[in-house]
Every structure is written in C-alpha cells, then in structure tokens.
Amino acid sequence: MEQPVFASIRYSAACQDCGAELECWGVQALVNGSLRWDTESRCPACGFAVAACGGDLPAELRDRLLSERGPALLQVVPSARNAVIMRVLRAELGLDLVSVRSVLNEVVTGAYSGTLPEMELLAGRLRASGIDAVAVQP
C-alpha cells in the first residue's frame, strides 16, 4: 500500500455569523488511490464552526493550494511510450483525442502541473502501466 500524499493550507475568511476572522484549514489527499478533500473553519469570536468534504476539489480550494504550496510537476522518463501515456491520461482526465495530445506534450516536456496529490495520482497510474513517472514539488 502506498503512503498517503497530502497538500494542506491554513487561511482566514470572514465569519458568516459575526463577521470576525475565521480560522480555516483545507487539505487535499491521495489515500488508497483516491483523491479526497476537506475543509474546516472555526470562529474564535462566536464559536461558529463548519466542516465540509467531498468528491471533486472545489476550484477555490484548489487555487489556494496552488497559490500557497505551488504546483507539482508530473515527470516521465524521456523513453516513455507516448501511446501508453495518452491512454492513461484519457482514462484519468476524461480527455478526447485532440485534447490529450496537448496534455501529452506538457507531460513529456515536464510542464504538466497541478496539486501534489493530483500529480501523484497520475504518476501512480502511469507507473501501474509500466511508465517510470514521478510527481515533483520544486
């Protein structure tokens, strides 16, 4: 079993009940081959608290993770077979044949990026298909 991969942040927002500053935490994790996320917020002034989690990572949380933690890069060995990479990308990202060619170019040049858990998920799927791949957080 692979080790979980996490990306987390702490941030502030306005409390919806009293307007004071909320303490907020967000995390995206790759656990047992699945991406998960959750957020928690707590107001020290009024006690308001909320937690949320779900399937698809909300764009706002993804943008915060990328902004604060920076993007991770998906890297493959130069000798990797493009057809295998394309098959994995199409299956994992739901891309059509035209779109996958553009993403393939980014992958083979080391420019394809996302959150660390997202890139590690793709790297793991590529490794399972015989492609030497890693997720790197510069």
Image (cartoon, rainbow, N blue to C red):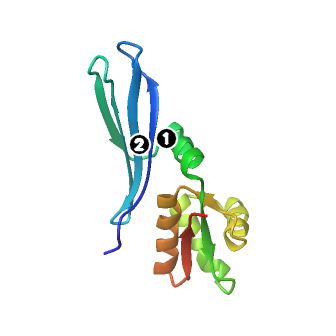
Cβ–Cβ below 8 Å for labels 2 and 1?
A: yes
Task: Please indicate, yes or no, whether residue 95 appears anywhere in the rendered image.
Answer: no
Residue drawn at 60 percent across, 56 percent down:
71
Residue drawn at 68 percent across, 69 percent down:
110
Determine whether 118 is above or below 109 in the image. Answer: above
Spot the residue most to the front: 45
Spot the residue most to the top: 18
| Amino acid type at mark 1 | Leu
Residue 35 location, quadrant:
bottom left
Left or right of 19 in this view: 101 = right
Between the C-alphas of marks 2 and 1, the distance is 7 Å
Tell me the residue that label 1 is attached to.
61
Looking at the rendered structure, the number of numbered marks drawn on it comes to 2
Task: Please indicate, yes or no, whether residue 23 appears anywhere in the rendered image.
Answer: yes
Crowdedness of circle 2 by 10 Å Cα count: few (<14), some, many (20+)? many
Instruction: Indicate the position of residue 36 as horizontal and vertical percent values.
Output: 37, 52
Tell me the residue that label 2 is attached to.
26
Residue drawn at 48 percent across, 40 percent down:
58
Residue drawn at 55 percent across, 82 percent down:
131
Of 36 and 137, nearer the camera is: 137
Q: Earlier in the sequence, mark 2 or mark 1?
A: 2
| Amino acid type at mark 2 | Gly
